[in-house]
Amino acid sequence: MDNCCGVDSNKTAGKPIKCRAAVARKAEEPLVIEEVIVNPPKSGEVRIRIICTSLCHTDITFWKLKGACFPMILGHEAVGVVESVGENVTSELVEGDTVIPTFVSDCGECRDCTSQKSNLCSIFPMSGSPLMYDGSSRFTNIKGETLHHFLSVSSFTEYTVVHAANVTKIDPMIPPSRACLLSCGVSTGVGAAWRSANVEAGSTVAIFGLGAVGLAVAEGARLRGAAKIIGVDVNPEKCEISKAFGVTDFIDSTSCGEKSVGQIINEMTDEGADYCFECVGKSSLVQEAYSCCRKGWGKTIMVGADGQFGAELMLSSSEVLLRGKTLLGSFFGGLKPKSDIPILAKRYMDKELELDKFVTHEVGLEDINRAFDLLIAGKSLRCVIWMEK
């Protein structure tokens, strides 16, 4: 058994590693820093030494679920270094590579992964399973108790095991505290504007929900040259914060009087915004967004997920038929991780994509519960959690 500090992959490859992890044992209870055992990768998998990870609202959503598979190692936004590879991993990934694990797989072989029209891998679809694709876990505690995985990543640990289809190699020169943001939230938002919606220069954009994903949509729309970007949120403090991300107009949805948000947006634009993004995950907001996207060519893009999976949408059939508007879902912004994440990383290194403004706090692993407190209180966008700080 090898401890994590100063690990030499030549000595640890093929052996279990003992390291620290923040374990969620019960819903809504503080995570516990424990010693865990991370077993070697099996066929098609890699073991990664996590450098840093960031907290996403999706982590909190599942942490609150009473029926989740506890104990569990949460976390799905991270950057790390490949410590060892299992059998049948192609030369694309080798020991020492700097990589980003993602909850979206990209096998490069199935019909979806080889098509430019889809990023929904057919061989390794996202299922929400608390185990690896072979139905087993690579984590135990020191007593042998099985610890469950989370969204194919589990990054609140110094070491993790991820399938190669969920790992993207990146330029090691990008700062880790910025690279980890590309695992989920920022890529999802920027991708929704770039890939899913294909926002055009000079267009009008409305964004419902100005968390990190919504602000990433604004960042993507800004880079695409949108003329008007309207941000909608229940928190009036987001008015000033969002300006840095390109938001030109702000609506406090709690202070609209007798008018709906949709009515106000219709009045602010030429019969509706060209693109409306729902970034919260509420069916009622999807309907509101659809009501204020422009007839003829308006697009409403569903981006958010807050645990209301399966909630029904109520849309007027006449509005769908006669208004010529489009409603589409955007999973991970429509991006293909292995090809698109390196592009976003380069845009950051070229000082085009501004990632720095997303990071509001940084803590060590031992203070991970503070990151939860900050995000729940609405005081942070992204808190970076360092394994060694």
Image (cartoon, rainbow, N blue to C red):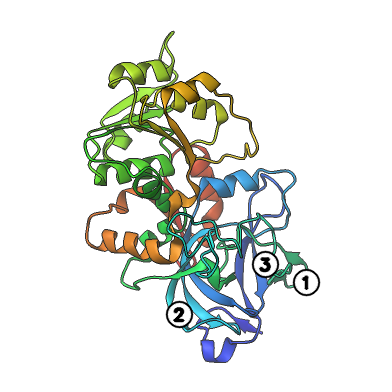
Q: Are marks 2 and 3 in contact (CB under 8 Å)?
A: no
Label 2, on which residue? 92
SS category of the residue bearing label 3: loop
Query: Who's the residue at 42% across and 44% down the image?
Result: 212
Q: Which percent across, then down, holds residue 348?
A: 28, 59
Q: Are marks 1 and 3 in contact (CB under 8 Å)?
A: no
Q: Nearer the viewer, residue 250 or 333?
A: 333
Of callouts 1 and 3, which one flags the residue occurring earlier in the amino acid sequence?
A: 3
Query: Who's the residue at 60% across and 82% down the image?
Result: 86
For mark 3, does the 10 Å Cα neighbourhood hold few (<14), some (14 to 19), or many (20 or more) residues? many
Question: In the image, which disc is placed on residue 143?
Answer: 1
Amino acid bearing label 3: Met
Of the 4 image quadrants, the one containing the C terminus is bottom left
Tell me if residue 338 comes above or below residue 60 in the rendering: below
**Mark count:** 3
Whether residue 316 is visible to the viewer of this picture, yes or no, is no
